[in-house]
Amino acid sequence: MIEFGISVYPEQEDINETLAYIRMAGKYGCTRLFTSMFSIDDIEAVKNKFSLLTKTAHECGITVTTDANPKLFERLGTSEKDLSPIKELGIDVLRMDVPFFGEKDITLVNNDQGIIIEFNAMLPQFVDAIYAKAEHKENIRICYNFYPERYTGVDYKPYVNLNEHYKKMNLPLGMFISSQEKNTHGPWPITNGLCTLEEQRTMDVDLAIREVLAIGGISAIMIGNAYASEEEFKKLNSIKNFLEEKEEAQSFNTGTESHTIPVDLTRKKVLLNIELAEDITDIEKEILINFKNHSDAGDGTAYMLRSRFPRMAYGRSAIPPRPYKPSHFTKGDVVIVNDTLSRYKAEVQIVLKDMENDGQRNFLGRIPEEEIHILDYLKPRDIFRFKEK
């Protein structure tokens, strides 16, 4: 299950405003909080703030992660062998943005304080070495950086490759997206958003989250800059509810035989917006929007993603041909097989490559241009659902 979270920077913020923000995040289902300590000049002056912050977070069911580096241990008057000062502040996770690069990191991971040690996702060889030697591997977690400076964020290709790498190790992996609210802040006075993926810097929270889910491999998505708006939290919570929706087996009777679509909780779930055709029929809209198990079997066709299961549920429904002027369907179009091809009637298809409009398919709508690229990340057996835009 995906966790969602926020980030706060108490050295720059009014404590009451920060606590109200934490409570709002908890109200909308956030369970993670990221903050930073190594950019703070006077640690003693903010200890009370941190204690109040962590207490409030825990009351809201939110765990607290703080950025750390070797110098922080010196400033706290402790070492990798004694994490009690960290524990006393109510911190649950230490994110070693800059690790010790040695045996001290293994000592951290093997701590008996119950503190999770989170490492920088951009150090895969280092993480591999720690993972191989650590006794308490369950104390290891990974997280990407965020990037305040424009054009410095991670590109899709290395991100996808690293996600696959950590997935094979079964390590929890987090990343950051940006609130699009004006005048947000991070640990430094730069207001260009705080994201992991550069292409998501100015992307709406709803689309950014759905894109991350489509790519896969992530266990936590956090808003890097503060403060996000309540409207953005509502979008986040809507997707959270979609992910947590109870999956039930669907059974259909075609008249001659019964079929059951089993529950498979291992499948990735992706939510796609769609701009519906003006002349879509009620039955077509029901098949498209209400059917909850759209997925492609993985035959490898280059032309479409095929959701075949609706044929079982709606094969006896009438889907008469509707006129569609263009000579071809193009990538991002969503169509349904009509009565002219009775054996395949009610099959929903997402077009991936130009296909001739031969009259056997009705146009249902189109994926918005800004999210057509999400289709590139859908894999066989992934569940995809449609939401009317």
Image (cartoon, grey):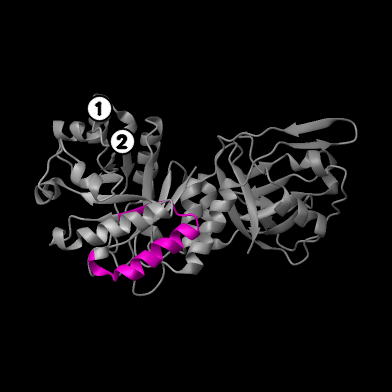
Which quadrant of the view contains residue 35?
Answer: bottom left
Residue under label 2, please give it: 140
Name the element at disc 2: strand
Q: Look at 55% across and 62% down and name the residue there.
A: 369
Q: CA distance from mark 1 to mark 2?
A: 9 Å
Q: Residue at the far bottom: name it.
A: 183
Q: Is residue 37 part of the magenta span, yes or no?
A: no
User: Can you give x and y, in whole percent of width and height, for residue 225 in the image?
Assistant: 34, 63
Q: Is residue 29 part of the magenta span, yes or no?
A: yes
Residue under label 1, please give it: 134
Q: How many marks?
A: 2
Within 10 angstroms of label 2, few (less than 14), some, or many (20 or more) residues?
A: many
Residues shaded magenta: 11-34
Closer to the camera, 209 or 157?
209
The reply to whether dot 1 and dot 2 touch (C-beta < 8 Å) is yes
Closer to the camera, 345 or 215?
215
Which amino acid is tagged 1? Ala
Within 10 angstroms of label 1, few (less than 14), some, or many (20 or more) residues?
A: some
- Relative horizontal placement of residue 172, taking residue 264 as reference (left or right): left
Q: Look at 30% across and 59% down and name the residue there.
A: 52
